[in-house]
């Protein structure tokens, strides 16, 4: 008997299983995460529909989209039915979602609490496998002028150029800044070097009349605020 090699395309599925048609009929919020991913990849493999394949991919990361976003192209291509083009589609869609979160935080634009800093910076550094140090530059209304990466380091730490931090502040006309860096280990306890660096930047800012309002340590789901803990 001749072996069938045709993959399951969306057009071949039962009507109830067609995510594109479902989106058109019921709206995008009616679709599951797996159905949305199935639209991205278009088809599955010879023995598996795109929805089933998408469910399997999601199950591998505990049905957590944030964890899915951490997979690189090679990781995604380990699943049968996912080639380079499909892996790129998934990665691109998740990156757009991450950027949307950053954009929404910037639209609010005014920093009024440590929580608002976390919402701004968590999508940027909260899920990285290495440490990065960023500065949020503010005007006199506590509105964000710019967020800027000052350094990028290994998992053990990062080096920060204090002169560059305040050069940027002067060029932007910033009157205050907030420090933020991530701990890939997940720990929220500041190290002694974190404490020393905060003091160093605060002292440098005082001579220029630029206030250091806070320093946040950010992990995937939580943060530590020096200001909230009265450590500034």
Image: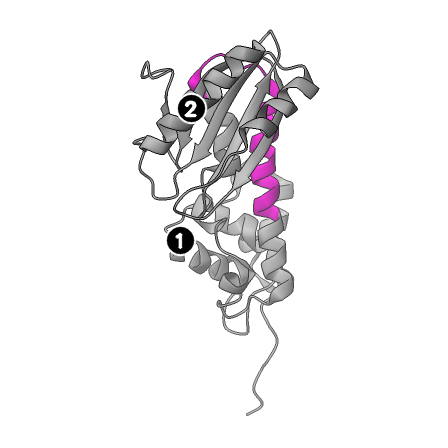
Residue 21, given in percent of the width and then of the height, sits at 63, 48
Residue at the spot of label 1: 61
The answer to whether residue 202 shows anywhere in this view is yes
Left/right of residue 215 with respect to residue 175 in the rendered view = left
Residue at the spot of label 2: 198
Segment tinted magenta in the rendering: 93-115
Residue 67, given in percent of the width and then of the height, sits at 43, 48
Quick check: is 106 in the magenta stretch? yes
Residue pictured at 40% horizontal, 30% vertical = 217
**Circle 2 SS class:** helix
**Circle 1 SS class:** loop
Q: Please, what is the dominant secondary structure of the magenta stretch?
A: helix
Residue pictured at 35% horizontal, 15% vertical = 228
Residue pictured at 44% horizontal, 54% vertical = 58
Q: Distance between the residues labelled 2 and 1?
A: 36 Å
Circle 2 or circle 1, nearest the eye: 2
Residue pictured at 53% horizontal, 57% vertical = 72
Q: How many marks?
A: 2
* Residue 76 or residue 162, whichever sits in front: 162
Quick check: is 99 in the magenta stretch? yes
Answer above or below: position of 27 versus 225. below
């Amino acid at each position: 008997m001749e072996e069938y090699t045709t993959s399951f395309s969306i057009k071949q599925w039962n009507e109830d299983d067609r995510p594109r048609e479902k989106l058109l009929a019921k709206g995008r919020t009616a679709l599951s995460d797996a159905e949305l991913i199935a639209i991205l990849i278009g088809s599955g493999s010879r023995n598996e529909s795109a929805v089933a394949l998408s469910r399997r991919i999601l199950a591998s990361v505990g049905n957590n989209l944030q964890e899915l976003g951490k997979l690189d192209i090679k990781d995604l291509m380990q699943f049968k039915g996912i080639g380079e083009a499909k892996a790129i589609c998934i990665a691109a869609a998740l990156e757009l979602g991450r950027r949307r979160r950053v954009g929404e935080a910037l639209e609010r634009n005014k920093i009024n609490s440590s929580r608002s800093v976390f919402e701004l910076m968590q999508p940027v550094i909260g899920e990285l496998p290495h440490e990065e140090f960023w500065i949020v530059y503010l005007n006199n209304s506590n509105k964000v002028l710019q967020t800027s990466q000052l350094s990028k380091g290994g998992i053990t730490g990062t080096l920060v150029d204090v002169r560059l931090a305040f050069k940027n502040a002067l060029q932007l006309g910033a009157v205050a800044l907030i420090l933020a860096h991530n701990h890939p280990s997940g720990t929220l306890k500041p190290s002694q070097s974190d404490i020393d660096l905060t003091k160093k930047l605060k002292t440098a800012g005082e001579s220029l009349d630029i206030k250091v309002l806070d320093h946040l340590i950010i992990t995937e789901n939580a943060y530590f605020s020096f200001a909230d803990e009265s450590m500034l």
